[in-house]
Image (cartoon, rainbow, N blue to C red):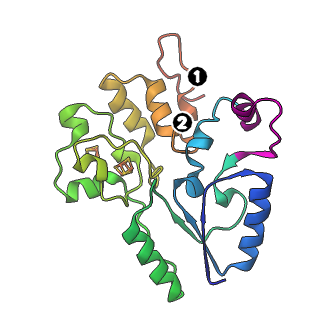
Amino acid sequence: MDITFVEGSVSQKHDLEKLERIRAASRWLVAVGNCAVWGCVQKGGCTNCSAAEKMLQVYGKDADFDVLEAAPLEKHVHVDVRLSGCPINATQFLSVTASLLQDHLPYITSKPVCLECKLKENPCVLIEDNLPCLGPVTAAGCGALCPSMGAACYGCWGPCQSPQMDAMAQVLTEKGYALEEVISRLGSFGAPAELFKRWKPFNENGAAVKGV
Ligand code: SF4
Ligand code: SF4
């Protein structure tokens, strides 16, 4: 196959077996959507419990699943292109496909959503409305969809390159958002836990103890 597009995270053993066969048979493998790129909500939802425990809670002890911890595709196989988004952007999908058909790896920006938001000259909902907008640490590509509608970005494209998590947490906590909520928002689309680990554990006032 020239190009294979794979959606979803690897969360059961048969997913992994299928993925390895697909990788072996594909010239280009494209991870499509936040689940495939970051692991998304099923990974984020298992931060404090194992995937097996989660399955047990949902399906009961008679459920027979060969569960793996939900993970992005690139944890298991080489991925040529990571096409994030929840959902992805149709224009970006077409442009990536056109590049690969000409045997070129496409350019995908790793800048934050704020860049697209400012190019659209949107008012900043973080500054002006005190909304918990995650645009400064979220990968661009959606065209700043939510802030363009007056809503906060909740991070569905996953983190941008080198996200300034400390600064983001500081701004949001100064605006009255609890750090636990900030971490929950940042982590709910599968952003790697390493990005937050220096904020844990919290002291008795709920503030982060840094450098742990
Ligand atoms: S509204 Fe959000 S995405 Fe837009 S500039 Fe402000 S923080 Fe960035
Ligand atoms: S603005 Fe944020 S939450 Fe909204 S679509 Fe874009 S990345 Fe997703």
Q: Residue 48: horizontal and vertical position, in percent?
A: 65, 29
SS at circle 1? loop
Count how many numbered circles sit on residues in the image: 2
Q: Which residue is labeled 1 in the image?
A: 201
Q: Residue 62: horizontal and vertical position, in percent?
A: 83, 33
Placement of the C terminus among the 4 image quadrants:
top right
Residue 107 visible? The answer is no
Residue 45, image quadrant: top right
Q: CA distance from mark 1 to mark 2?
A: 10 Å
Judge from the rendering whether residue 67 lies leftward or rightward of residue 116; answer left or right: right
Q: Amino acid at mark 2?
A: Phe
Q: Amino acid at mark 1?
A: Pro
Mark 1 or mark 2: name the one nearer the start of the chain: 2
Q: Any mark on residue 163, and which? A: none
SS at circle 2? loop
Q: Per the image, is 111 magenta?
A: no
Q: Any mark on residue 196, and which? A: 2
Placement of the N terminus among the 4 image quadrants:
bottom right
Q: Residue 192: horizontal and vertical position, in percent?
A: 58, 44
**Hey, which residue is sitting farthest top in the picture?**
204
Judge from the rendering whether residue 73 lies leftward or rightward of residue 17; answer left or right: left
- Residue positioned 83% across, 41% down in the render: 64
Residue stretch rendered in magenta on the structure = 50-69
- Residue positioned 45% across, 35% down in the render: 185
Q: Per the image, is 57 magenta?
A: yes
- Residue positioned 37% across, 30% down in the render: 170
Q: Residue 106: horizontal and vertical position, in percent?
A: 47, 76
- Residue positioned 68% across, 68% down in the render: 78
